[in-house]
Image: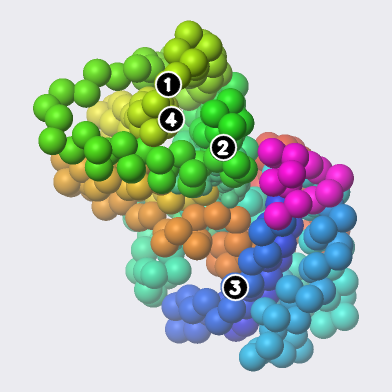
């Protein structure tokens, strides 16, 4: 079976075709256009996102289906929530139109589940992983910092465990970059500058943290205090060392996630962890998670960087899990900016 995925929830316009054969997933194409226009605004500008999706989606679809004709598609998966309303609507309109013309089913996909389930592209066959493994999910992106319990993969049963009380971690990186007059998106720039500092201090014995690691209640996250601490620090120290500040900001932002993951692992039992979202590319996070993997003897799956950011392959992959689990999902679904409202459309588990 060949599956077309469409992703337009934020500032990436993406289309992908995957093949699902003998319970194995293969990505045949995954074309991603990152909208540069938002760099001017230092953040995603919803009106522009929607216009750019409309301008580019057909060309992106053409590129994705260069080697596989659209007429060969058996199933379509499209991000229906959460995201920017106009942006979501552009992708869903195209997906529904193609589905109608081809008389094939179209599946509304939760973008955040996509960030987690893309990890299964390398695990084969699907039916070997679906039965009795319970996964912890961590989505860390520009809009979300959520943990999930994946009770079951087919039928898919996922429930949210915790989230951020204020800013998302990627948003915190982007805001920090704005405060420090760096570009957008801020995460990769701060990551690079922090690595430079790490090189400079690699022989130092003790590093005194500048910023406290946030620690809100339960399994939740919080980044507004860290942002305020950064603003205060740069005001008080006008000749601050940029690489040093980036290093310490990243240290506190990532340690916060790692500490919460450890707390969850100490109090719950999981067979593995799935990580996804743009911030999952972060070099310090990857090092820290590798240590957690060894310390707790638990398998941690993180996608390669191109599959961490928003892409349509993750949507196509997730649509297979949903289709196999809930084949009777209504085709007249709506879009939703918010995850929970989107789920109410069809998911009752
Ligand atoms: O998942 P994504 O592409 O889009 C959303 O769904 O939000 O994530 C984008 C976010 C941005 O906030 C960006 O700054 C952050 O991911 N990001 C990073 C890194 N690469 C991207 N944050 C920290 N370190 C990175 N290496
Ligand atoms: Zn995302």
Q: Which quadrant of the rendered structure holds the C terminus? A: top right
Q: Residue at x 55, y 33 (%)?
A: 177
Q: Is the residue indicated by label 4 positioned so its CB lies within 8 Å of ligand 1?
A: no
**Tag 1 near tag 4, CB within 8 Å:** yes
Tell me: 140 left or right of 267.
right
Q: Which residue is mark 4?
A: 242
Tell me: 30 left or right of 13.
left
Give the Cα separation between the discs numbered 1 and 3.
Answer: 42 Å
Q: Earlier in the sequence, mark 2 or mark 3?
A: 3
Tell me: 317 left or right of 59.
left
Q: Residue at x 37, y 38 (%)?
A: 194
Q: Earlier in the sequence, mark 4 or mark 3?
A: 3
Q: Which residue is mark 2?
A: 182
Give the Cα separation between the discs numbered 4 and 2.
Answer: 10 Å
- Answer yes or no: is residue 81 visible: no
Choose between 269 and 86: the one closer to the eye: 86
Choose between 9 and 95: the one closer to the eye: 9
Q: Residue at x 50, y 61 (%)?
A: 307
Give the Cα separation between the discs numbered 2 and 3.
Answer: 29 Å
Could you say where residue 38 lies in the image, as x and y percent from the top left?
A: 73, 47
**Label tally:** 4
Q: Quadrant of residue 315?
A: bottom right
Give the Cα separation between the discs numbered 1 and 2.
Answer: 14 Å
Q: Nearer the viewer, mark 4 or mark 3?
A: 4
- Answer yes or no: is residue 305 visible: yes
Query: Which residues, given as a range, are shown in magenta?
Result: 36-49
Give the Cα separation between the discs numbered 1 and 4.
Answer: 6 Å
Q: Which residue is mark 1?
A: 240
Q: Is the residue indicated by label 2 positioned so its CB lies within 8 Å of ligand 1?
A: no
Picture layout, residue 129 above or below residue 158: below
């Amino acid at each position: 079976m060949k599956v077309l995925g469409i992703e337009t929830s934020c500032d990436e316009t993406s289309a992908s075709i995957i093949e699902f054969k003998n319970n194995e997933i293969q990505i045949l194409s995954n074309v991603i256009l990152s909208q540069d226009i938002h760099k001017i605004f230092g953040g995603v500008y919803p009106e522009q996102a929607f216009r750019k999706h409309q301008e580019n989606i057909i060309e992106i679809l053409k590129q994705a289906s260069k080697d596989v004709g659209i007429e060969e598609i058996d199933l379509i998966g499209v991000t229906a929530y959460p995201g920017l309303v106009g942006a979501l609507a552009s992708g869903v309109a195209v997906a529904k139109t193609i589905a109608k013309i081809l008389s094939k089913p179209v599946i509304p996909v939760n973008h955040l589940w996509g960030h987690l389930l893309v990890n299964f592209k390398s695990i084969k066959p699907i039916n070997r992983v679906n039965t009795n493994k319970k996964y912890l999910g961590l989505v860390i992106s520009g809009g979300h910092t959520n943990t999930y319990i994946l009770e079951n993969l087919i039928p898919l049963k996922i429930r949210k465990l915790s989230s951020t009380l204020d800013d998302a971690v990627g948003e915190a990186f982007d805001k920090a970059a704005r405060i420090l007059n760096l570009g957008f998106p801020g995460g990769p720039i701060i990551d690079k500058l922090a690595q430079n500092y790490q090189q400079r201090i690699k022989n130092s014995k003790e590093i005194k943290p500048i910023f406290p690691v946030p620690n809100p209640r339960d399994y939740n996250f919080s980044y507004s205090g860290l942002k305020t601490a950064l603003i205060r620090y740069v005001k008080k120290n006008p000749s601050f060392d940029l690489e040093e500040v980036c290093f310490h900001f990243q240290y506190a932002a990532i340690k916060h996630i790692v500490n919460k993951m450890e707390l969850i692992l100490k109090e719950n039992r999981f067979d593995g962890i799935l990580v996804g979202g743009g911030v999952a590319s972060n070099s310090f996070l990857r090092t820290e998670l590798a240590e957690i993997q060894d310390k707790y003897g638990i398998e941690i799956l993180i996608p390669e960087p191109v599959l961490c950011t928003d892409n349509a392959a993750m949507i196509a992959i997730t649509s297979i899990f949903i289709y196999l689990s809930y084949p009777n999902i209504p085709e007249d679904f709506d879009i939703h900016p918010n995850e929970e409202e989107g789920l109410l459309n069809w998911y009752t588990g």
